[in-house]
Amino acid sequence: MPLSGTGTAPTFVTVLLRGLLAGLVAGLLAGTFAYVVGEPHVEAAIAIEEAATHAGPTADGHQHGEEALIGRDGQRGGLFLATGLFGVAMGGLLASAYVLLARRRQTADDGRSGLLLAGGALLGAVLVPFLKYPPNPPAVGDPATIDQRTVTYLLMVVLGLVAVWSGSLGYRSVSEHAPVWLRASAAVGGFLLVTVVSYVVLPSFQEVPADFPATLLWNFRLASLGTQTVLWTGIGLLFAALMHRQRAAADAPLAG
C-alpha cells in the first residue's frame, strides 16, 4: 500500500527493495575498504598473536600449534560476504525506519530524510559505541570477559540510538519559531545527557597488553571506524539517490 494518501507514493515493498539494494552495494564498498585498509593491520596483529603463542596460550584461549578452522584466504573472501550481508540487513532496517517514520518527517524531501536516518544510525550505532568500546585487533582482549563485553557493547548500541532519539525530541520540544541555535542546543543537550550517563554507568574494559604497539592498535581502530563510516555513508547516499529518482519519476507525468 502507498506510504501516504497519494497514489504516486512508493509502497513499503518498493522502499524496502531500494534499501536492500543500497545496503548490498554499500556493504561491498565497505568490504573493499576493510580489505585494502584494514587487512594489513589484522595481519600484523595476527603475527604478534602467533609470536606470543611460544610463551603460552593465545589471547583467544588457543594453545600453540592449534590451527584456525578457516584459513586466512577463506577469511578474506568471507569478509565481502559478511559486509555484504550486514549491509543488506542495515539497508533493510533503514528502509523500515523510513516507512515507520513517514508521518513524523518534517520534510517532504525523500533523499534528505534517508540521509538524516543514515546519519543518525552512524552517530548512534557506530560513533557513540566506538568512543566507549573501540574494537580490538587479534591478540587483544581477555577471553574470560568476551560475553560481558559483547552484552555491554550491544547495550551501548541501543543507548546510542536512544541518545539520537533524545536529541531529536529535544529539537522538537522547542517551538519551530524559536532561533535555530536554541533548537540545536536542545538537541545537543538531549543527546549528550543520554550519552554521558551511559558512559558513566556502563563498565570499562582495559585489556590492551602493555607491550602491544600503540600505532597498530590506533590504525586498526581507525580502519574499523572507517569501514562502518563507508557502510553508512554509502547506504545513506545510495538510498537517498534511489528515493529521489523514484520521486522524480513519479512527478514527471504531473509536470507534463
Image (cartoon, rainbow, N blue to C red):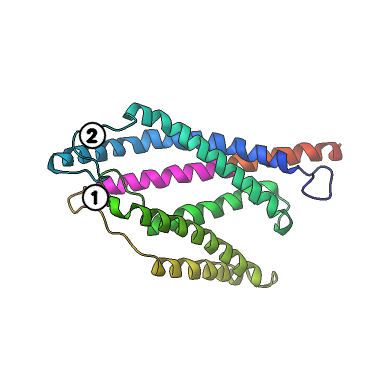
Instruction: Examine the rendered structure and indicate whether residue 112 appears above or below residue 165.
Output: above
- Residue 194, given in percent of the width and then of the height, sits at 49, 68
Q: Which quadrant of the rendered structure holds the C terminus? A: top right
| Residue occupying the point 51% across, 57% down | 124
Crowd band around label 1 with a 10 angstrom C-alpha radius: few (<14), some (14–19), many (20+): few
Instruction: Examine the rendered structure and indicate whether residue 241 appears above or below residue 154.
Output: above
| Residue occupying the point 37% across, 53% down | 147
Task: Specify the amino acid type for callout 2.
Answer: Glu
Residue 233 seen by the camera: yes
Residue 122 as seen in the image, left or right of residue 117: left
- Residue 14, given in percent of the width and then of the height, sits at 71, 39
Q: Residue 25, located in which quarter of the rendered image?
A: top right
Residue 66's tag is: 2
| Residue occupying the point 43% across, 42% down | 227
Residue 21 as seen in the image, left or right of residue 208: right
**Is the stretch drawn in magenta largely helix, strand or loop?**
helix
Task: Please report the bounds of the magenta region as a residue range.
Answer: 214-236
Asked whether 220 falls inside the magenta stretch, the response is yes
Residue 112 seen by the camera: no
Residue 214's tag is: 1
